Amino acid sequence: MDLLSKFYFNYSKIIKTIKIYLLLAGPGMIVMIADNDAGGITTYAATGAKFGYSLIWFLILLGPVAYFIQEMTVRLGAVTKHGHAEAIFSGFGPFWGWFSLLDLTLVNWLTIITEFIGMTAAMSIFGIPPLVTVIVVIIVMFGIVLSGRYWTWEKITMAFCLVNLIYIPAALLVHPSVSDIIRSGFIPNFPGGFNGELFFYMMANIGTTIAPWMIFFQQSAVVDKNMKEKDIPWGKFDTVVGAFFTIIVAVFVIIVTGTLLYGMNIESAGQAVHVIMGTHQWVGTLVAIGLFDAGFLGAICIALTSSWAFGEVFGWAHSLNYKVKEAFWFYVFFFVGLITAGSVVLIPGAPLVLITLFVQVVAVTLLPAALVFLIILLNNEEIMGKYKNTLFDNIANITIVVCIIVLSSLYGISTLFPNLFG
Amino acid sequence: MTTMVREFGEQIASIVRESTGKIRIINQKYAKPKIQLSGGAKFALLLLELYLIFLVVLLAYKFWTIIHGSVL
């Protein structure tokens, strides 16, 4: 009897914990999974096709890297109740404020174009014309965002996050060799030696794991969700879970393309889907759905990031908890961003490849600044109080930030000058 | 027609005036940074400025190479 009551007590405790987590889960999970956007899927697909399973170990290392950066935004948002754009204006003055805000808006808008490129490419597999995809996507996003409650938006978006796991059944369908995956994927190695090409791919994977919008998004989402200081441990846990899933998805994309497309040069996820569709229709269908979902998640989160940032700085009402008439400019900014980015994809002969490359270069101008501001703000006792960075936090975060700045800068420069690294 | 064009112009001018006013208010509001920067933080910001100048120079060089048809 005693054993039974103990079991019931523990069972109730676990259920209660899960319920609290589900209530507080959201920003960390969404930002991490949305990080596997259309550009991210393209990078993983190209990496798998080029190097097979060999770089899986490297992607696994990127999980903790993403976590360490993003957990700082949870603390900063929960303590200050301000988004990152407002925190930069407030902490560093108008010069850095305007630089960050305008750069963020530009890089976000360009990234949303790449999300639409991914979504239209995925839907074209099913014979759906780009015009229909763009219109339907914008209408659906209207519906989700205009629910008038942050909670509703968050839970619907989390359902889209679950769809991102579609790469797991896709990988199982291609019957990869588990021993090959473990042997070549989980033991650190540099396939073909450490050369310029491998370095470029590694930099591309870092570039897709940490993007400027993620910092602004999670901090604003934490504020919009009204998370308090006492919720920080849950916010961190949510970010860990998100980081775990983002790496799982990345690894399974690599497994799919490393099995089916090994040795091919893949330049876009759309191209990968077309090739897979030719031999494995079911896998191709799942990958296409995953690509569409990735673009959708990316577009809705990135567009919101810009709206939140502008709302914070311009003093507009800027919460998903407001109705359209209460936060008119917040929603206008959101939809203008989406509609104009979607329209670019529909322009015949638009330089979409150039735009995709340009995103990397513009992101490199913002990422170091956003990361440096984050570290400085997290070290300010006046702002953070007992939640400021500890010595361990600083050692881990400053090391990661310096590495990211150097590698993402090299990636941006190599995008500008492709022959630089041989 | 002329009246419509004039009204449209006035509306645009009013929006520009309002936005400029708003930007001025934002600049005044955040004119004095609210945090005390340590020596390390000031040094990091200086490095950041130099880094951005370097990127701008690099972008300018890229455009120059595109215009003159030579590639690094």
Image (spheres, coloured by chain):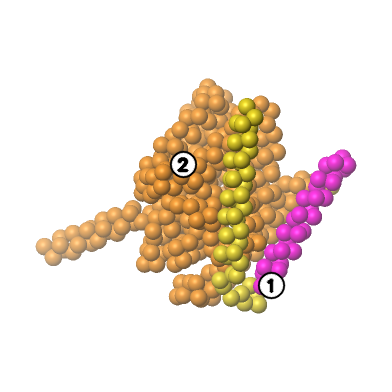
State the extent of the magenta-drawn residues as a range.
B42-71
Does the segment drawn in magenta span residue B51? Answer: yes
In percent of width and height, residue A362 lies at 67, 49
Is most of the magenta stretch helix, strand or loop?
A: helix
Does the segment drawn in magenta span residue A170? Answer: no
Q: In this view of the protein, which residue sits in the foreground, A11 or A366?
A: A366
Secondary structure of the residue carrying numbered label 1: helix
Chain B pictured colour: yellow
Chain A pictured colour: orange
State the CA–CA distance, disc 2 to disc 1: 42 Å
Question: Most extreme residue toward the left, as rendered?
Answer: A1
State the residue at coordinates (66%, 73%). Answer: B42
Task: Identify the residue under disc 1.
Answer: B43
State the residue at coordinates (44%, 34%). Answer: A140
Q: Chain of mark 2?
A: A
Specify the quadrant of the image occupied by residue B63. top right
Secondary structure of the residue carrying numbered label 2: helix
Q: In this view of the protein, which residue sits in the foreground, A381 or A332?
A: A332
Labels 2 and 1 touching (C-beta < 8 A): no
Amino acid type, residue under disc 1 in the picture:
Phe
In percent of width and height, residue A266 lies at 65, 36
Question: Most extreme residue toward the front, as rendered?
Answer: B3
